[in-house]
Image: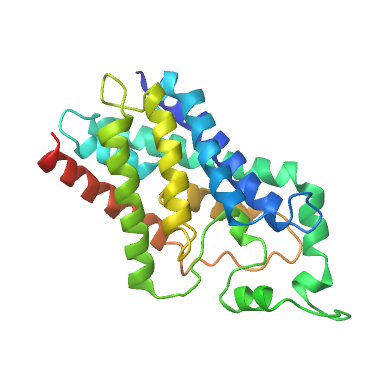
Amino acid sequence: MSSSDIFIGETIGTAILILLGGGVCAAVTLKASKARNAGWLAITFGWGFAVLTAVYTSAPLSGAHLNPAVTLALALKDDGISWSDVPVYWGGQLLGAMIGAALVWVAYYGQFHAHLTDKEIVGGPGAQATTAKAVEAQEKGAGPVLGIFSTGPEVRVAWQNVATEVIGTVVLVLAVLTQGLNDSGKGLGVLGALITSLVVVSIGLSLGGPTGYAINPARDLGPRIVHALLPLPNKGGSDWSYAWIPVVGPLIGGAIAAGIYNVAFA
């Protein structure tokens, strides 16, 4: 794979991942959406299908890492990818995540505006009621639609939040390394895409409750940057004080998973 193939494949694949994954979060969250309040099952399966679609689309070009933690693990894995390719993968993943988040905004433009100008959501003069959840989120520096773009904890305990992200990412990356790789061992294969998407659903159902299961630094950081830049009315903060956790936690988890694989499976 050439550097251009890697960069283009990761950009396209991660954009699709975030478009569909962020899209299901928008569908469930925004007041004027037909899927409003569809619940956690819709979100977890939506993200699983997003992974499936993104991997099948980008695998022929880049091997469909779509996640800096997966790329790091494959660089640490015996006979894995070259370290010189890591920045190319990471650059494509971050750019793709930002593009995907911007496309979610485009697709739900009217719903974002309706949601963020609703006094019951954002409060303000003349509001009949302000939801406790929105008030709580704003007190923590997170705006009322930040959860569409990036993750946040239900209970803000830094070490636990990091540990949750580490544990979830170890499960994901171990599944990729043991079951998901193509014949070259440098990316996801056809069957691996299905296995990985089901693992993502499992992680969401079992381990997603505490932090929203980023398990992917680009998936969280890219859309958070877009949230900060978009001209959304009454959008609130982007919660930058938390932003390091869904970056550092998954990278640590990816490195641990690679170490376990090299010792136990290689």
Q: Nearer the viewer, residue 167 or 158?
A: 167
Q: Is residue 260 left or right of residue 43?
A: left
The answer to whether one can see residue 207 in this image is yes
Identity of the residue drawn at 29% across and 52% down? 253
Q: Is residue 177 above or below residue 249?
A: above
The C terminus sits in image quarter = top left
Identity of the residue drawn at 76% across and 62% down? 233
Q: x, y (%) of residue 258?
A: 21, 43
Q: Farthest residue in the right direction?
A: 126
Q: Quadrant of residue 88?
A: top left
The N terminus sits in image quarter = top left
Identity of the residue drawn at 70% across and 50% down? 27
Identity of the residue drawn at 81% across and 80% down? 129
Q: Nearer the viewer, residue 7 or 169?
A: 169
Q: Nearer the viewer, residue 149 or 129?
A: 129
Q: How is the image coloured?
A: rainbow
Q: x, y (%) of residue 245?
A: 39, 62
Q: x, y (%) of residue 97?
A: 53, 42
Q: Quadrant of residue 157?
A: bottom left
Q: Is residue 163 above or below residue 91?
A: below
Figure label count:
0
The answer to whether one can see residue 4 in this image is no
Q: x, y (%) of residue 41?
A: 58, 52
Q: Nearer the viewer, residue 36 or 81?
A: 36
